[in-house]
Amino acid sequence: LVIGNHGDRGFVNLLGLELPAGGLLGVSSEGARAFPPLLTIPSHYDLAGGREWHFFFAWVLAISATLFLLYALVSRHLQRDLALTRAEMRPSHLWHDIKEHARLRFPTGEAARRYNPLQKIAYLAVILILIPTVILTGLTMSPTMNAAWPWLLDLFGGRQSARSIHFLCALGFAAFIAVHLAMVVLAGPINELRSMITGWYRLPQAKGPTTIRTEDAA
């Protein structure tokens, strides 16, 4: 992915396909930029300032993730609500859930009270894989941390490998957020947002006859 400009014309090049971006991406009043000032922190080109903001939000992520994980363990939220059951780990069950989501058929009734297997997998992947990896790879890129914790270099195969993994984790976060927001919109944004703010959630009702899978009932 390359975002740049040809004079006063911005462009986005994705896998060799170049798309015109006008003034939205690739160009601004200051010249070549990746994104418009309203979408960046800081709003102007400042590499040193950008690094400081990056480290600030890294601390926000690390502290909030640690506190959430401790709460999830102490309250048993992790084991009770996010751990996959033996039935949910069956390939047939997972494949059924994938097909239902692909058809935009979401759980209704009492089933909507619980996380479905795909939600559990996504949340566990973010909490237990993406967040720890993005923090550790970020530390690996620091020369000071290399001197203090040289085992990080061995763990990720060097600073360049850590940089690539760090970038892939960032893409993973972006994909998770995009899919998460899309699911909120498709599942009913008013009901979903109201439940986040007030805690009151209206159970969606099935439009047709309710089907119970035999293996789940067992």
Image (cartoon, rainbow, N blue to C red):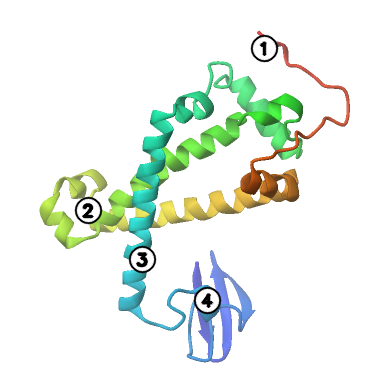
Residue 64 is situated, as x and y percent measured from the top left of the image, at 39, 49
**Mark 4 crowd level (few <14, some 14–19, many ≥20, 10 Å Cα):** some
Q: Which residue is mark 2?
A: 158
Q: Which residue is mark 1?
A: 215
Q: CA distance from mark 1 to mark 3?
A: 48 Å
Residue 55 is situated, as x and y percent measured from the top left of the image, at 32, 64
Quick one: SS at disc 4?
Answer: loop
Q: Along the polypeptide, which appears first: circle 4 or circle 1? A: 4
Q: CA distance from mark 3 to mark 4?
A: 16 Å
**Mark 1 crowd level (few <14, some 14–19, many ≥20, 10 Å Cα):** few
Residue 13 is situated, as x and y percent measured from the top left of the image, at 55, 71
Q: CA distance from mark 4 to mark 1?
A: 50 Å
Q: Which residue is mark 3?
A: 54
Query: What residue is shown at x 64% (from left), y 41% (from top)?
Result: 199
Name the image quarter holding residue 90: top right
Quick one: SS at disc 3?
Answer: helix
Q: Amino acid at mark 2?
A: Gly
Q: Along the polypeptide, which appears first: circle 2 or circle 3? A: 3
Q: Amino acid at mark 3?
A: His
Q: Is residue 191 left or right of residue 208?
A: left
Q: Nearer the viewer, residue 142 or 156?
A: 142
Q: Along the polypeptide, which appears first: circle 3 or circle 4? A: 4
Q: How many marks?
A: 4
Q: Is residue 201 left or right of residue 133?
A: right
Q: Along the polypeptide, which appears first: circle 1 or circle 3? A: 3
